[in-house]
């Protein structure tokens, strides 16, 4: 059994942040390629309806991510805080509860999709031209639901005990399998890819993309099972450890719910924006899907750093080492601002090239470029909110994290979407997310200032 808590306790702040954040960021980089792969390889078919079908289906796929976040992120923060408090035995119960709860809920959601996928897809913006492709994609994703949620839950739990590298390897391994399988399953023999003629291919289109995604998650789950069975973790996946009482369920859900709600609201807001964009045609939906995929690079890198340092923040908070916690937080924010600024500049300069990589359709590219510019505008500062939000989760401050999650994808974004669409039209839809991001950055800073004041008052009262 390996104890990774020395990273939390003994490493200097920059080294501790790097040890936790770099594996998470590398994992996110591969995750970006993994998320871009479906759209990229489906785009190589030259069929914009298949590209639009993936975009329409993505909000429903995000519901599986929401389940994984509920138990994965919630469990990760709870495990780290428990280690900081010196309660190592409790982490075994936490991990068992998170894994099996996520699998059961994932299976229930998958069954629901299988029975009602056509009706659901029409509700979320599928057209007569895209519905058959979307149905095929969602069918295979539903079959793989237990593996999709289990892979995410495993990865987060392992990160919570400080084994950031192991978490990265497990997630990246599955994503690489997905990327390798994508062209094999999606394209057909004789198609050209990067100037090379493919010697074989199953020509399955969007169905192939979904199957590759499921198989990648299967590989990730197998890796984590081997890691646990070899006894290298202080966590446990023994069913006999499963408990909902003694504050276990509440401790996980309190922190996991904001992360889950964020994924749910991302799904819901994507559904709403697809419905709104349906009034502007399938080209607008395809353009938004491509721009959102491209924008993932800056968002995922900053999320990766923020997610990576969350266990560090949680451990320091549990140990009441507020000075170290604040130093980690400040250093992480500075890193995210630099990353966001550099990536925004890069995307603005090469915007045409980036969008053109995904699809060869002049109208879709033109719309995608406009959308990408809008998405990237808050890039230099959005990382501040990500760090603070994950820090709130790590400290068990579910209310603050929930408010930010509700704001960015719901309470702020959705009203703005309808207002800006009504008064500005398509440009209003395009600039809605950027406007909501700026508002939520300000909200996060204000919430941190209030929380920081309460920590100072707590320290003064103890000294007194």
Image: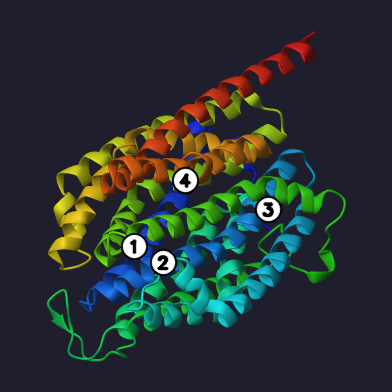
Q: Secondary structure at mark 1?
A: helix
- Name which residue lies at 72% across and 68% down: 100
Tag count: 4
Q: Are marks 2 and 3 in contact (CB under 8 Å)?
A: no
Q: Which residue position holds label 1? A: 278
Indicate which label's residue lies in the foreground, 1 or 3: 1
Q: Which residue position holds label 4? A: 414
Q: Secondary structure at mark 2?
A: loop
Q: Which residue position holds label 3? A: 75
Q: Are marks 4 and 3 in contact (CB under 8 Å)?
A: no
Q: CA distance from mark 4 to mark 2?
A: 16 Å
Looking at this view, name the residue that lies furthest to the top.
Answer: 464
Q: CA distance from mark 4 to mark 3?
A: 29 Å
**Are there few (<14), some (14-19), or many (20+) residues within 10 Å of tag 1?**
some
Q: Are marks 1 and 3 in contact (CB under 8 Å)?
A: no
Q: Are marks 1 and 2 in contact (CB under 8 Å)?
A: yes
Indicate which label's residue lies in the foreground, 4 or 3: 4
Percent across and percent down for residue 280 are 28, 59
């Amino acid at each position: 059994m390996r104890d990774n808590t020395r990273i939390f306790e003994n490493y200097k702040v920059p080294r501790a942040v790097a040890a936790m954040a770099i594996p998470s960021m590398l994992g996110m980089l591969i995750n970006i390629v993994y998320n871009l792969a479906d759209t990229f390889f489906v785009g190589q078919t030259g069929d914009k309806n298949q590209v639009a079908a993936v975009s329409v289906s993505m909000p429903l796929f995000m519901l599986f991510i929401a389940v994984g976040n509920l138990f994965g992120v919630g469990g990760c923060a709870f495990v780290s805080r428990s280690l900081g408090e010196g309660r190592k035995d409790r982490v075994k119960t936490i991990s068992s509860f998170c894994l099996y709860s996520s699998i059961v809920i994932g299976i229930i959601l998958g069954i629901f999709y299988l029975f009602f996928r056509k009706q659901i897809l029409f509700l979320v913006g599928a057209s007569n031209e895209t519905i058959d492709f979307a149905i095929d994609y969602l069918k295979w994703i539903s079959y793989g639901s237990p593996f999709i949620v289990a892979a995410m839950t495993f990865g987060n739990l392992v990160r919570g005990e400080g084994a950031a590298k192991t978490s990265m390897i497990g997630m990246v391994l599955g994503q690489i399998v997905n990327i390798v399988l994508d062209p094999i399953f999606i394209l057909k023999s004789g198609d050209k890819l990067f100037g090379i003629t493919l010697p074989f291919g199953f020509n399955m289109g969007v169905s192939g993309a979904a199957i590759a995604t499921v198989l990648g998650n299967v590989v990730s789950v197998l890796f984590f099972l081997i890691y646990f069975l070899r006894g290298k973790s202080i966590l446990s996946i023994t069913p006999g450890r499963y408990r909902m009482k003694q504050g276990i369920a509440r401790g996980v859900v309190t922190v996991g719910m904001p992360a889950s709600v964020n994924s749910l609201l991302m799904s819901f807001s994507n559904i709403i924006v697809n419905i709104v964009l349906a009034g502007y045609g399938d080209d607008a939906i395809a353009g938004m899907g491509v721009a959102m995929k491209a924008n993932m690079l800056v968002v995922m890198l900053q999320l990766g750093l923020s997610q990576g340092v969350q266990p560090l923040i949680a451990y320091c908070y549990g140990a009441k080492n507020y000075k170290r916690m604040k130093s980690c937080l400040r250093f992480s924010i500075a890193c995210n601002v630099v990353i966001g600024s550099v990536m925004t500049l890069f995307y603005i300069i090469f915007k045409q090239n980036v969008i053109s990589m995904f699809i060869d359709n002049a109208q879709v590219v033109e719309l995608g470029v406009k959308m990408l510019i809008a998405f990237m505008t808050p890039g230099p500062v959005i990382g501040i909110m990500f760090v603070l939000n994950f820090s709130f989760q790590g400290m068990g401050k579910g209310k603050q994290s929930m408010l930010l999650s509700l704001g960015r994808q719901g309470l702020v974004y959705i009203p703005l979407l309808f207002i800006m669409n009504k008064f500005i039209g398509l440009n209003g839809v395009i600039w809605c997310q950027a406007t909501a991001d700026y508002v939520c950055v300000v909200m996060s800073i204000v919430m941190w200032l209030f929380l920081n004041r309460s920590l100072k008052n707590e320290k003064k009262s103890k000294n007194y």
